[in-house]
Amino acid sequence: MGGIIFGLIVLVIGGLFTLAEDHKTSKMSEDERWEYEWKKAKKGR
């Protein structure tokens, strides 16, 4: 049960971050956004 709750929290926080990132990256082109997301994903690992 705890795993489900934790998953929901992660999803909510992830959603908030995504909204903030979208606001920041909306001025970028599609290619720049992909590159930005790719670097962020690699850094996260």
Image: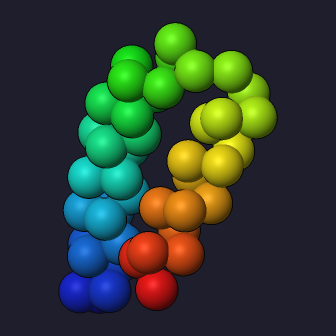
| Display coloring | rainbow
> Which residue is rendered at x = 68% and y = 21% of the image?
29
x, y percent for residue 17: 31, 43
> Which residue is rendered at x = 62% and y = 60% of the image?
38
> Which residue is rendered at x = 66% and y = 35% of the image?
32
Quadrant containing the N terminus is bottom left
Report the side of 10 relative to 29 (left or right). left
> Which residue is rendered at x = 76% and y = 34% of the image?
31
Report the side of 29 relative to 11 (left or right). right
Q: Residue furthest right?
A: 31
In the foreground, 16 or 26: 26
In the foreground, 8 or 27: 27
In the depicted structure, whether residue 9 falls above or below residue 21? below
Please give the count of numbered marks on the rendered protein: 0
x, y percent for residue 33: 62, 36
* Residue 41 seen from this side: yes
x, y percent for residue 27: 52, 13
x, y percent for residue 26: 52, 17
* Residue 19 seen from this side: no
Q: Residue furthest top?
A: 27
